[in-house]
Structure formats: structure tokens, C-alpha cells
Image (cartoon, helix red, strand yellow):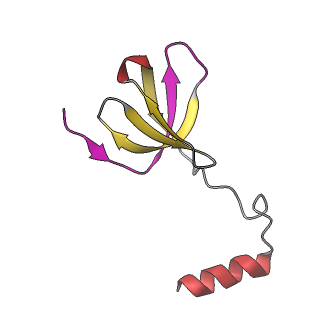
Amino acid sequence: MHVRRLHFALAIFLLSALPLSAQVQVSGGNPLVIQSTGGVTQLIPASMVKERKRLGRSLMMGADQLGLTAQQVADIAEFLK
């Protein structure tokens, strides 16, 4: 099986639990390697995964959730130019 290193958000539906929203670190392998919000890395055996769906949104917290002001966001954007 081909293992690809990916970095996109997925909803992962497990056979016996609530869905997870996470960033996929390695797809196509066993186990599936994901990183949850907060940076926790988890290994999920492929046999436990019922379905995977790509999320249509980012898992990154918004500037307001991070406590950033509009000026701080503008400063970061200018720094990244």
C-alpha cells in the first residue's frame, strides 16, 4: 500500500466512536496518523476507520479565538510578505 504524507483536514468516522476532526499527517498507511486541534498526534488502526470525509474548512482557530487584535493580524501579514 502506498503511504502519502498529507496535510489537510478530515472528518474521520470510527466504527465505535464519535467522529474526529483532525489534520491528516500520513494517509494510506496503517495506522492512520492524525493531529488533532491542540497538536495531539494520534494513531488510528485502519480497521477502526469507517469513513473519511474532507472538511470544507480549516481547523485553524480564528484570530479572535487566539486573542489577536486587528493590528496584530496586520503585523503578522506584513511580516509574512
Give residue 56's position: percent from left, percent from top.
53, 45
**Vertical position of residue 60 compared to residue 47: above or below:** below
Where on the picture, by quarter, is residue 65?
bottom right
For the point 58% across and 26% down, the residue is 19
Left or right: where 80 falls relative to 2: right
- Image quarter for residue 27? top left
Q: Position of residue 80 (x, y in %)?
A: 54, 82
Q: How many marks?
A: 0
Residue 79 lies within the magenta run: no
Percent position (x, y) of residue 67?
80, 65
Question: Percent position (x, y) of residue 16?
Answer: 54, 13
Magenta stretch containing residue 9, yes or no? yes
Q: At 49% from the left edge and 14% from the top edge, which residue is drawn?
A: 15
In the displayed structure image, the side of residue 1 where residue 30 appears, left or right: right
Task: Tell me what residue is drawn at x 44 percent, y 23 percent.
Answer: 51
Vertical comparison of 11 with 67: above or below: above
Q: Residue furthest top?
A: 16
Above/below status of 71 relative to 48: below
The residue range painted magenta reads 1-18
Locate the N terminus and report the quarter of the image it occupies.
top left
Q: Residue at x 71, y 59 (%)?
A: 62
Q: Is residue 68 left or right of residue 15?
A: right
